[in-house]
Each structure stands twice: as structure tokens, then as C-alpha cells.
Amino acid sequence: MNLSSGLTRVLAPGWAAYSAVKGAVEVLSAYMAKELGARGIAVNTVAPGAIETDFFGGAVRDTPEFNTFFAGMTALGRVGVADDIGPMIASLLGPENRWVNAQRIEVSGGQGI
């Protein structure tokens, strides 16, 4: 399992290099899924949206204007927290999802729709 970003789908000026690297992670994950599949290894990419973390100096978490802006971009009307991402990753790694492979799974509360 690899981590990408919602910024590979929702464009924001100033984030081109970061987004390009995360796009490369998504392509790498697809290749890994193909190459490791014969060994029974599934590889997926999880792409979180705006999350209240230390990322970018904690801007989404600590700057009310950023938090409100990104919350307004989500269908669920709020930004995410770590507990929105961790359980999804844990379930993806469990045996009940062993057939999920080579997927980009966005976990963003519907950001940008």
C-alpha cells in the first residue's frame, strides 16, 4: 500500500512538484501490483484529501481560514482527521479486501466533486 494525495486530482498552484511525485507513486503502485501479483501481493494507493495533520506546518489544522476553505470543497462539509484515514487503510490491508488490487482509492470526504 502506498500513499498519494488528492492533489493529483484537484489542482492547486504551487504544488506541481509535490503532485508530480505523488502521481509517480500512483503509476509505481500500478506497476508494483502487476509485477508482484504473481506472488499474491496486492498493491494499492490511498489518496487522502485535506486532513488535519502537521502537513504543511499544520495549516489545515491550525489555520481556520484554510480549514473552512477545504471543508467547503468536500461533500461532507469538513476536512478529514487521521482517524478517517487509518481505519480505511487497515481494512484495505485485511484479508476481506485481498481482491482489491492496482487501485487508487481517494479518501477525501468527496473533496472537489
Image (cartoon, helix red, strand yellow):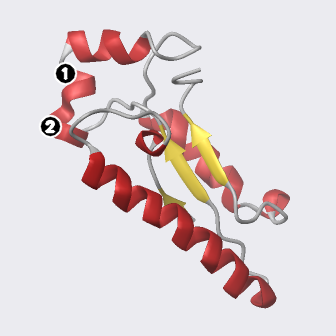
Horizontal and vertical percent position of residue 113: 59, 20
Mark 1–mark 2 Cα distance, whole angstroms, equals: 9 Å
Q: Is residue 108 left or right of residue 67?
A: right
Identify the residue at horizontal 33%, vertical 29% (top origin): 52
Which quadrant of the view contains residue 22? bottom left
Q: Is residue 20 left or right of residue 15?
A: right
Identify the residue at horizontal 58%, vertical 69% (top origin): 29
Mark 1, residues whose alpha carbon is within 10 Å: few (<14), some, or many (≥20)? few
Q: Is residue 105 left or right of residue 55?
A: right
Quadrant that contains the N terminus:
bottom right
Q: Which mark is residue 26?
A: none
Q: Are marks 1 and 2 in contact (CB under 8 Å)?
A: yes
Residue nearest the viewer, comparing 19 with 4? 19
At label 1, the amino acid type is: Asp
66 versus 32 height, above or below: above
Say what secondary structure mark 2 lies in: helix
Say what secondary structure mark 1 lies in: helix
Horizontal and vertical percent position of residue 41: 72, 80
Horizontal and vertical percent position of residue 109: 57, 24
44 versus 82 height, above or below: below
At label 2, the amino acid type is: Gly
Horizontal and vertical percent position of residue 57: 14, 37
Identify the residue at horizontal 36%, vertical 57% (top origin): 20
87 versus 44 height, above or below: above
All told, the count of numbered labels is 2
Q: Which mark is residue 57?
A: 2
Identify the residue at horizontal 19%, vertical 21% (top origin): 62
Residue extending farthest left: 57
Which sits earlier in the primary sequence, circle 1 or circle 2?
A: 2
Residue nearest the viewer, comparing 87 with 22? 22
Residue at image mark 1: 62
Which quadrant of the view contains residue 38? bottom right
